[in-house]
Amino acid sequence: VFAGSDFVDAQRAEAIAKAVAERVERLKAHIRSREYGRDDLARDVKRDMAYSGKERRGKSDIER
């Protein structure tokens, strides 16, 4: 990205590239430390409360 740039010299470009690479490695380590795919029924839907259009509405119901 910085090759041939008039605003960033080679030393600065190398430092930025090194910092980005280190951040990528830290992000990879963070992702690997997480557990994905675990079912958590505590937050699962208990009852389908979606409006299907078949229910009768009362005067006090708010339009969705």
Image: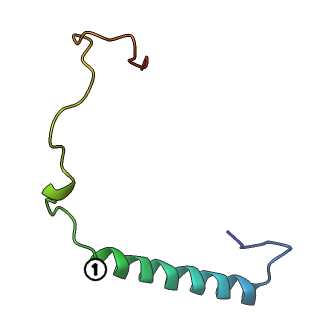
Q: Is residue 47 above or below residue 20?
A: above
What is the quadrant of the C terminus in the image?
A: top left
Residue 14's place in the image compared with 47, above or below, is below
Most distant residue in the front direction = 60
- Three-letter code, disc 1: Ser
- List x then y, in percent, for residue 12: 74, 86
Q: Secondary structure at mark 1?
A: helix
Q: Front-most of 12 and 36?
A: 36
The correct choice, above or below, for 10 with respect to 50 in the image is below
Q: Quadrant of residue 62?
A: top left
Which residue is pictured at 72% across the width and 72% down the height? 2
Residue named by callout 1: 33
Q: Position of residue 60 (x, y in %)?
A: 40, 16
Examine the image and state in which quarter residue 57 appears: top left
Q: Residue furthest right?
A: 6
- Tell me, what colour scheme is on the image? rainbow
Residue sitting at x 42%, y 77%: 27
Assess disc 1: are there few (<14), some (14-19) or many (≥20) residues with their C-alpha within 10 Å of its C-alpha: few
Q: In this image, 5 relative to 33: left or right?
A: right
Q: Total of numbered circles in the picture? A: 1
Is 45 or 36 nearer to us in this picture?
45
Residue closest to the eye, 55 or 13: 55
User: Going 18% across and 44% down the picture, which residue do you hit?
Assistant: 45
Q: Is residue 60 above or below residue 22?
A: above
Q: Residue at x 23, y 30 (%)?
A: 49
Give percent across and percent down for residue 36: 22, 65
Q: Of residues 12 and 59, which is closer to you in this image?
A: 59
Task: Give residue 10's quadrant in the image.
Answer: bottom right
Where residue 54 sits in the image (x, y, percent)? 22, 10
Q: Quadrant of the N terminus?
A: bottom right
